[in-house]
C-alpha cells in the first residue's frame, strides 16, 4: 500500500483496517450474528446511516481481519454506544482508535509485548459476548473464509443422521451444532435435520434453534419448524414455553418469509399470546413486525400482558431499530388503537 497517513490522522475504523493492509470482514453480533457490509459500516461511521441493528443502545460488532500472507485471522469484539437516533457515538469510536493506535501503531497484526497487551486489554470498548454467540460467530467466520469446520462437526453429523441413539446427546458439542447450522444449506444438512426434528431431545434442539436463528434457509426447513412450533402451541402446556420460544428463534432470519409472516399473523390474531413469545418476537423476529398490520396487534398483546415495565422496555427497544421506527410512530398515531394502548403510550412519554 503506497498511501501514507500519520496514525493521528486516522478518522475511522474502516480507514484503520485499510491502511494496515488488512483484509477484513464485519458482523453484527448484538441481536443475531449476521454479516455487516463494509459499505454500510463506512456510512455508519460517517453518521450517514443509523446503525441497522442496535441492541440496548449499542452497536455490537465483530471484526475479523488478517494480512494477506497470514492464514490466522485476528478478532475484535466491539461494543460502541449509539445516540437516541441510532447514530454512532463519534467520541467513543475515536477513543477506541486512539487506544489501538497507541498500542499498535498501524501494524495491527504485530506480536505484542506486555505493555501493548495491557493497553489493549484496558480498552473499554472490547467485550465478551455470550458463549453461544461466540460459537456461532466462529462457525460463520470459518464458512466465510472457506476454512474447515471444527472437529466437533463430524460427531454431530453422525448424531443428527440417526446413527446413534437420540439419547446419546452428551457427546454432542455446541461448536459442532453451530458448525452444522452455519452450513445448513450445504450437503444434505436440511434433509438430515428435517428427518431428525421429531426425535431431538431438548438438550440438542434448544442450542440448535439458537444457532439456526442466524441462518436463512429453504422452505422445507421453514415448514418443518413451523409445523413443530404449531403443534407445541396447540398443547397449551406451559412446560413447552421454552421450546416454543426457541423454535420461534430458529425462524428469526427468515421472519420476513411469507410462511413465517402468515404464522405470526395467526399467532397475533389469537386472544392471548404469552409474554415469552412477545419478547422473542421483538428481540429476534423484528423483521416480521415492520408492518402496521402486525405491529399494532403486537402492541395490543403487549398492553394486555399488564406489565408496564415490559411494555416500556420493548417499545423503547423497537423504536431504536431504523426499519421499525416509522411503523412504531404510525401505531402511536393510529385512530384504531385501543384506549389501553393509547394510555400506555401516553404514560411512556409522561414518564420520559
Image (cartoon, helix red, strand yellow):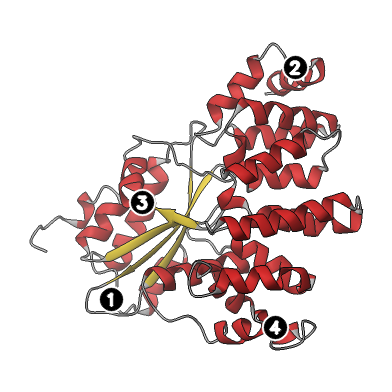
Q: CA distance from mark 3 to mark 1?
A: 26 Å
Question: Between disc 4 and disc 3, whose residue precedes?
Answer: 3
Q: Residue 86 or 4: which is nearer the viewer?
A: 86
* Element carrying mark 3: loop
Label 1 crowd bin: few (<14), some (14–19), many (20+), radius 10 Å = few
Q: CA distance from mark 1 to mark 4?
A: 46 Å
* Element carrying mark 2: helix
**Rendered position, 312 above or below 72:** above
Q: Between tags 1 and 4, which lies in front?
A: 4
Which residue has dot 2 on it? 342
Question: Between disc 2 and disc 4, whose residue precedes?
Answer: 4
Q: What residue sits 65% from the left and 19% below the top?
A: 332
In the image, 2: left or right of 268?
A: left
Question: Between disc 3 and disc 2, whose residue precedes?
Answer: 3
Toward which corner of the image does residue 250 lie, by quadrant?
Answer: bottom right
Q: Quadrant of the C terminus?
A: top right
**Rendered position, 206 above or below 329:** below
Which residue has dot 1 on it? 110
Q: CA distance from mark 4 to mark 3?
A: 38 Å
Which residue has dot 4 on it? 162
Q: CA distance from mark 3 to mark 2?
A: 39 Å
Amino acid at each position: 500500500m503506497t498511501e501514507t497517513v500519520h496514525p493521528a490522522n486516522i478518522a475511522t475504523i474502516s480507514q484503520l483496517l485499510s491502511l494496515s493492509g488488512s483484509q477484513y470482514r464485519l458482523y453484527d453480533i448484538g441481536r443475531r450474528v449476521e454479516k455487516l457490509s463494509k459499505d454500510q459500516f463506512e456510512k455508519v461511521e460517517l453518521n450517514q446511516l443509523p446503525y441497522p441493528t442496535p441492541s440496548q443502545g449499542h452497536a455490537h460488532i465483530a471484526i475479523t481481519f488478517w494480512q494477506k500472507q497470514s492464514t490466522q485471522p485476528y478478532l475484535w469484539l466491539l461494543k460502541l454506544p449509539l445516540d437516541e437516533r441510532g447514530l454512532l457515538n463519534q467520541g467513543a469510536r475515536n477513543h477506541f482508535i486512539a487506544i489501538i493506535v497507541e498500542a499498535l501503531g498501524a501494524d495491527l497484526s504485530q506480536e505484542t509485548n506486555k505493555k501493548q497487551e495491557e493497553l489493549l486489554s484496558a480498552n473499554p470498548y472490547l467485550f465478551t459476548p455470550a458463549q453461544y454467540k461466540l460459537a456461532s460467530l466462529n462457525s460463520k467466520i470459518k464458512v466465510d473464509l472457506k476454512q474447515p469446520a471444527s472437529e466437533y462437526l463430524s460427531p454431530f453429523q453422525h448424531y443428527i443422521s440417526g446413527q446413534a441413539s437420540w439419547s446419546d446427546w452428551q457427546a454432542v458439542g455446541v461448536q459442532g451444532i453451530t458448525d452444522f447450522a452455519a452450513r445448513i444449506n450445504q450437503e444434505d444438512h436440511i434433509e438430515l435435520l428435517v428427518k431428525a426434528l421429531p426425535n431431538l431431545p431438548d438438550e440438542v434442539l434448544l442450542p440448535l434453534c439458537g444457532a439456526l436463528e442466524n441462518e436463512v434457509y429453504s422452505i422445507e426447513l421453514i415448514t418443518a419448524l413451523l409445523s413443530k412450533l404449531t403443534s407445541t402451541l396447540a398443547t397449551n402446556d406451559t412446560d413447552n414455553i421454552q421450546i416454543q420460544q426457541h423454535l420461534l428463534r430458529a425462524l428469526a432470519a427468515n421472519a420476513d418469509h411469507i410462511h413465517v409472516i402468515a404464522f405470526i399473523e395467526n399467532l397475533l390474531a389469537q386472544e392471548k399470546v404469552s409474554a415469552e413469545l412477545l419478547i422473542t418476537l421483538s428481540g429476534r423476529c423484528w423483521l416480521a413486525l415492520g408492518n402496521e398490520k402486525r405491529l399494532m396487534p403486537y402492541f395490543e398483546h403487549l398492553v394486555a400482558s399488564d406489565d408496564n415495565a415490559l411494555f416500556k422496555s420493548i417499545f423503547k427497544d423497537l423504536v431504536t431499530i431504523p426499519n421499525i421506527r416509522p411503523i412504531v410512530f404510525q401505531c402511536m398515531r393510529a385512530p384504531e388503537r385501543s384506549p389501553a394502548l393509547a394510555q400506555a403510550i401516553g404514560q411512556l412519554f409522561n414518564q420520559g
